[in-house]
Image: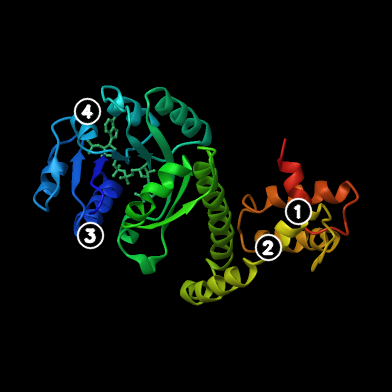
Amino acid sequence: EKTPVTLLGLGAMGTALARTWLAAGHQVTVWNRTPARATALAAEGAAAADSAAEAVAANALVVVCLLNDTAVDEVLAGADLAGRDLVNLTTSTPAQARARAEWARERGARYLDGGIMAVPPMIGVPEAGGYVFYSGSSELFERHQQTLGVPVGTAYVGEDAGFAALHDVALLSAMYGMFAGSAHAFALIRKEDIDPAALAVLLADWLIAMAPAVHRTADQLRSGDYTQHVVSNLAMQVAGTPTFVSTAEQQGVSPELLSPYFELMRRRLAEGSGEEDLTGVIDLLVR
Ligand code: NDP
């Protein structure tokens, strides 16, 4: 017998989630502020509730996927959550997630927070590699892992309800750093007779080749020795930074995406850390 699911929020993400549960044979009760979106899903077999409270009452497992934490407040205001297993996939900050976990506990619900590492087209497509970080009640996670894993993969990261959001933001922050570096790289060739598609092939391969360096960073953070297994030391790398700045100038490109990182490298070097890896920059960021 497949676990019935209540889903509140039928935006791009919620709709994709509902569809995969329906396709897998789960009973799905849905509710959305704008009823038209629920009507469309009802044609595919979902039960459309008239109110959020009614949808919450329908099933023990209640999944919420709304725009933001304020919307979660508004939607769940009138619902009786006692005895419910509340899974909140709405993107939030760690603090919002922790507050929501406490809020749910006060209302007699078990709580699991989620951070979705996927876009809607990856939902229901296991080979796309998407997954959701979960944190909060391990009991709830274990009970519903199979159901939660139907639309997209699952990764439980701890009892602290804020950890899913924290992992989500950490990974996406690194992604923005990668996008920033790529933007600078494309800018450098923009005025030249170089095919961006040819550069893209080289860029993707290079970024993939460099990505495993994060394991060395992690090893250094764990040991506290930032000179461990250094490949290119900080003194050498700082000495190279004028080449990057001058090249940007020569190409008519603003160095504004690179400069903040170079500035941190210089500050760390000034502390006498020339033999270290780049890991010391992390200590400068942590206030
Ligand atoms: P959409 O903008 O497509 O949908 C937003 C949903 O929130 C709709 O169901 C909307 O209802 C509802 N909503 C917004 N405000 C309120 C409110 N005040 N009261 C009641 N309902 C409200 O967003 P997505 O479905 O794409 O995203 C949902 C969550 O998933 C977000 O937290 C997002 O960060 C996260 N996410 C999305 C990804 C994506 O690529 N789409 C990727 C990873 C995470 P209505 O239909 O009535 O407007």
- Label 4 belongs to which residue? 53
Would you place residue 43 above or below residue 83 in this image?
Answer: below
Q: Which mark is residue 222?
A: 1
- Label 2 belongs to which residue? 215
Q: Secondary structure at mark 2?
A: helix
Amino acid of disc 2:
His
Which residue ends up furthest to the right in the rendered image?
Answer: 272
Which residue ends up furthest to the front in the rendered image?
Answer: 1
Q: Earlier in the sequence, mark 1 or mark 4?
A: 4
Q: Which mark is residue 191?
A: none
Q: Earlier in the sequence, mark 3 or mark 2?
A: 3
183 with respect to 70 (left or right): right
Q: Secondary structure at mark 1?
A: helix
Q: CA distance from mark 4 to mark 3?
A: 25 Å
- Name the residue: 44% across, 29% down: 100
Would you place residue 197 above or below residue 19 in this image?
Answer: below
Q: Earlier in the sequence, mark 2 or mark 4?
A: 4
Which residue ends up furthest to the left in the rendered image?
Answer: 43
